[in-house]
Image (spheres, helix red, strand yellow):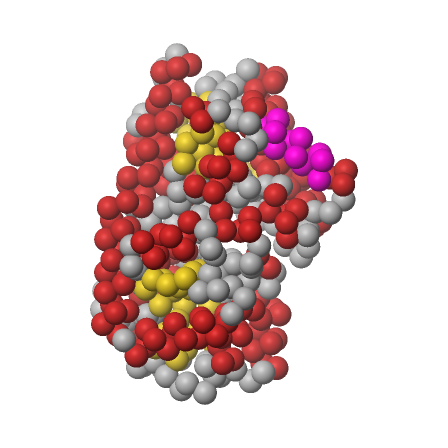
Amino acid sequence: MNILYIHQYFHTPYQAGSTRSYWIAQELIKNGHKVTMLTMNKKINSKLERVDIDGINVIYLNILYDNNSFYTRLTTFMKFVFNSIPVALKEKDIDLVIATSTPLTIGLPALALKWFKKKPYVFEVRDLWPEVPIQMGGLKNKFLVNLALFLEKTIYKNAKHIVALSPGMYEGVLKRKISKEKVSMIPNMSKIEEFWGREKNLGLINTLNLKKDSFKVVYFGAMNIANGMRYIIDAAEMLNNEKDIEFIFLGGGASEADLKERCIKENLKNVVFLGNKPMEELSEIVNICDVSLITFQNIPILATNSPNKLFDSLSAEKAIIVNSAGWTKDLVEDNDCGFYVDPEKPKELADKILYLREHPNKCLEMGKKARTLAETTYDKSILCAQFAELINSIEHQTGHRN
């Protein structure tokens, strides 16, 4: 089939950011499909640029992401909608559309293709929008709330199939009165060839001006309000006098500047911000660390998240500490690859970090169990194959052939 894959925030392994869509596209190509990726966020000199990236026909729209507030993000979302719909409608010989959130508005060009060109689409739910911004207080206007809920229902109802990225998201979709036969759960993926345990790069430790023998705690990924990173800084402040513990932050987002300012204000000597890094360098830095943190604000809907950094941490062979009382808590506890800590009690986080520092064998044991879980359950080769199998089944249902 010729597949139009719509992902507003598409990244390749050569960039910082989530690469799930890249790997799924690669698997679809291996299965004989042709994939065109419609995305944005690239500085180009024209309204549109079309390039080939590892066999994927990528269409970049000249729209840059603005993360300053919910409403500036909403403006970006709508810019993408209005620019992507005419481009999508002009694509020839499309058999199937895949639209992956967030944002929820990514479903609008998919709907346009269904309504105007009778093209079926698969909708991938990466976050339960609009419930996330509603519970977080970002979306308060009653008209916009009702409009968003109507859009969610319309997108789900018209989809050929829906893929949810966690058990909580799966249940959230079913609550919208969608039949189970129409919904699959395929979580985020571990990339065992990109993240793995090996000898620590001492030269890199020196280059980054880190302590050679410190116990290193890493957080990598988005630094936004939802990620609840003030909680980590609270724990870092409690451990500021522990000379051999370092907190390493990789990534960026709306909260980054405030976090840095607080660290300076409180004279925290145990916190280092390293910014966004491409996959290869990120993997090297994560490897020199001992524990990976996965944190979110204490808001019920966020417990349904399927964070990339969790699965990369599994693959990287790291002990993991989570603070969401959802399926990630069950995952680390049931597989003995990490700890859950109360999101309202940063002292619990500080205490678990101290425990793992003082019990290095336990820390290593948890890391090995994490790696085993990545290899046997969550590796991208396993989950991308599941996704491709779903698309192949839709191909047979619709009767499309290349």
Left or right of 249, for residue 77: right
Q: Which residues are magenta?
A: 145-155
Look at 56% across and 78% down and name the residue there: 263
Q: Which quarter of the image is occupied by the N terminus? A: top left
**Quadrant of the image containing the C terminus:** top left
Percent x, y of residue 366 = 27, 63
Q: In the picture provided, is 34 more to the left or to the right than 196?
A: right
Q: Nearer the viewer, residue 220 or 184?
A: 184
Secondary structure mostly seen in the magenta stretch: helix
Q: Where on the picture, by quarter, is residue 294? A: bottom left
On screen, 129 above or below 401? below
Residue 90 location in percent, x, y?
A: 57, 23
Indicate whether 56 appears above or below 158.
below
Q: Is residue 146 magenta?
A: yes
List x then y, in percent, for residue 351.
Answer: 41, 75
Q: Is residue 99 above or below residue 362?
A: above
Residue 50 visible within the image? no
Q: Nearer the viewer, residue 25 or 220?
A: 220
Q: Nearer the viewer, residue 400 or 55?
A: 400
In the picture, measured across the screen, residue 253 lies left or right of residue 369, that is: right
Q: Is residue 82 magenta?
A: no
- Residue at 43 percent across and 41 percent down: it is 167
Q: Is residue 151 visible?
A: yes
